[in-house]
């Protein structure tokens, strides 16, 4: 199926022939939907804490954090083009010589964008771009030059927002300044991640073409925060590795070939970033999306709950590592009962019941298998209709029941029972988590050992007008962490303020 040129393409990317064949096999077999058992809900998969307990865990984190190396990991490589979908569609209509009035009447969001333009945090920057063309946004709108204004806003010869990643866009306006999403991560991290040397570590995954812009802005921000807050930032960048790209296939599940006969590869989705996480040496790693940031008015609340998650993580890993060290020495009834109670309370009642049935030797083997894993503590917010995944109890191919973050695309919603379970979910995954990726002997786990390949995605795409199928690796916080010990914690909806479209910037939580 592959020729010598294809072998070289695979080799140049660092993809083995075995990997390529496995990917082709996935396309042929297809991907079975995830089997939902029940939604994870408060006190059955989602932990809920009162104010006193929250203070305990916040204090625990603040007291213990200097014992650990800590880093915040932010996937930031996604382009912002989807954020401006409505504006691009409006521009296409306006450029087709459609009447401005007709277009604005038909597209109310576009009309609102022009009406409320001055409220956006990037308005002053747009004014400067317009002034270089001897104009002003208000003047252009008054002259019905809406298409020209959108061109200046979206395209690279103007402000270029439609061609930049979200991290480099202005998200918030303050009295004395405006801040990008990128800077808001600096600001928030400075409030709770300082070590004893007043240093904060950040890691952003970015696209190669935007590396220079991110690096230049990072240097400016490092100088700014050193002067303004006496905090030094260590900022790392990484890109998605070519070895995580995946083959595309045609509709007959054969490798999709370009006009010159070469293989066609596509990025493996955010699951590819598991490789980037593997390369991180810090012990505690916070993970959050680049667009889930908030202005200063709600940062204290967000920080409080990040510290809650971290305090729970520290307590849990100490308990788990204590169990594993004890099991190495001996196993008595007291230890067995403590482990069974812990597994029942925080991991899985089904697993706890299985442990109860085992004699000592088998108990030790199974308990180590259950507990010796990477750990993550994930904030979960009440579901208010945001698109994306949520927390569920699922059953895998082996019949094991565990807590997972599941997307709607992974579920067979044509099955009434599965649809009912999915729709009964009370919570949503905001991608607000803290992770620990070392074992009880202080060795870094091989994170791929805990990835479930059966939780990949197959998507329909096109290239050069031809239909193809693309494979996305198991999502970073979905199948890529399927084998982790996962603890889900209820956090307030106010800690979640994503920006999925440009219009979200005018929501109350961003003003």
Image (cartoon, rainbow, N blue to C red):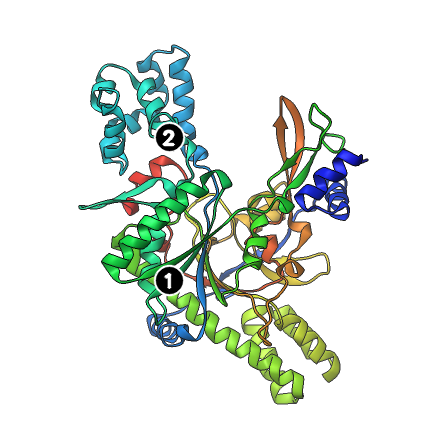
Residue shown at 64%/71% (left/top)? Answer: 370
Q: Is residue 218 left or right of residue 414?
A: left
| Crowd around label 1: few <14 · some 14–19 · many ≥20 (10 Å) | many
Residue 246 position within the rendered picture, expressed as x and y whole percent measured from the top left = 66, 41
299 or 409, nearer to the observer: 299
Q: Mark 1 or mark 2, which is nearer the start of the sequence?
A: 2
Q: Is residue 155 left or right of residue 395?
A: left
Alpha carbon separation for disc pair 2 and 1: 31 Å
Q: Residue furthest left?
A: 175
Where residue 362 sits, quadrant-wise, is: bottom right
To which residue does mark 2 refer? 160
Q: Is residue 76 above or below residue 372?
A: above
Instruction: Residue 258: tell me if it is visible.
Output: yes
Residue 187 position within the rendered picture, expressed as x and y whole percent measured from the top left = 31, 55
Q: How many marks?
A: 2
Q: Secondary structure at mark 1?
A: strand
Q: Is residue 496 above or below residue 344?
A: above
Residue shown at 59%/48% (left/top)? Answer: 272
Q: Is residue 157 above or below residue 306?
A: above
Instruction: Residue 359: tell me if it is visible.
Output: no
Residue 277 position within the rendered picture, expressed as x and y whole percent measured from the top left = 54, 57
Where residue 451 sits, quadrant-wise, is: bottom right
To which residue does mark 1 refer? 200
Where residue 464 sits, quadrant-wise, is: top right
Residue shown at 72%/29% (left/top)? Answer: 257
Label 1 near label 2: C-beta < 8 Å?
A: no
Residue 511 position within the rendered picture, expressed as x and y whole percent measured from the top left = 25, 44
| Crowd around label 2: few <14 · some 14–19 · many ≥20 (10 Å) | some
Q: Is residue 386 above or below residue 488?
A: above
């Amino acid at each position: 199926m592959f020729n010598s040129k294809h072998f070289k393409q695979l080799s140049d990317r660092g993809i083995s022939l075995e990997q390529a064949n496995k990917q082709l096999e996935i396309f042929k077999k297809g991907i079975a939907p995830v089997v939902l058992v029940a939604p994870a809900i408060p006190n059955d998969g989602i932990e809920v804490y009162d104010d006193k307990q929250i203070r305990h865990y916040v204090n625990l984190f603040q007291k213990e954090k200097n014992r650990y190396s800590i880093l915040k990991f932010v996937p930031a490589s996604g382009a912002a083009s989807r954020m401006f979908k409505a504006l691009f569609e409006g521009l296409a209509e306006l450029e087709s010589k459609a009447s401005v009035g007709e277009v604005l009447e038909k597209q109310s969001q576009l009309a609102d964008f022009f009406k409320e333009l001055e409220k956006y945090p990037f308005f002053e920057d747009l004014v400067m771009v317009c002034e270089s063309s001897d104009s002003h946004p208000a003047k252009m709108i008054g002259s019905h030059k809406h298409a020209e204004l959108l061109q200046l806003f979206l395209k690279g010869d103007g402000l270029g927002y439609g061609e930049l990643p979200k991290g480099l866009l202005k998200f918030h306006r303050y009295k004395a300044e405006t801040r990008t999403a990128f800077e808001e991560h600096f600001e928030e991290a400075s409030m709770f991640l300082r070590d004893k040397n007043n240093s904060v570590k950040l890691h952003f995954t970015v696209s190669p073409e935007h590396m220079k812009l991110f690096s230049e802005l990072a240097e400016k921000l490092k100088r700014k925060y050193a002067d303004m807050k006496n905090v030094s930032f260590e900022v790392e960048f990484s890109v998605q590795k070519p070895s995580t790209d995946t083959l595309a296939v045609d509709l007959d599940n054969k490798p999709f070939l370009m006009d010159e006969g070469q293989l066609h590869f596509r990025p493996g989705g955010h699951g590819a970033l598991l490789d980037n996480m593997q390369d991180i040496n810090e012990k505690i790693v916070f993970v959050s999306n680049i667009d889930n940031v908030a202005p200063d008015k709600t940062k204290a609340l967000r920080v409080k709950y990040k510290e809650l998650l971290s305090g729970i993580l520290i307590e849990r890993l100490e308990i788990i590592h204590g169990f594993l060290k004890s099991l190495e020495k001996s196993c008595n009834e007291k230890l067995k009962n403590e482990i069974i109670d812990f597994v029942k309370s925080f991991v899985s009642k089904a697993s706890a019941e299985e442990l109860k049935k085992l004699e000592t030797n088998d108990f030790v083997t199974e308990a180590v298998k259950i507990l010796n894993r990477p750990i993550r503590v994930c904030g979960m917010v009440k579901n208010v209709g945001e698109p994306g995944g949520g927390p569920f109890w699922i059953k895998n191919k082996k019949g094991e029941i565990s807590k997972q973050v599941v997307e709607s695309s992974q579920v067979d919603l044509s099955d009434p029972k599965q649809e009912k379970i999915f729709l009964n979910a009370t919570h949503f995954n905001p991608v607000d988590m803290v992770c620990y990726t070392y074992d009880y002997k202080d060795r870094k786990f091989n994170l791929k050992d805990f990835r479930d390949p059966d939780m990949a995605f197959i998507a329909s795409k096109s290239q050069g007008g031809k239909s193809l199928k693309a494979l996305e690796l198991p999502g970073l916080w979905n199948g890529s962490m399927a084998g982790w010990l996962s603890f889900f914690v209820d956090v307030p909806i106010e800690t979640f303020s994503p920006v999925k479209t440009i219009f979200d910037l005018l929501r109350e939580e961003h003003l």
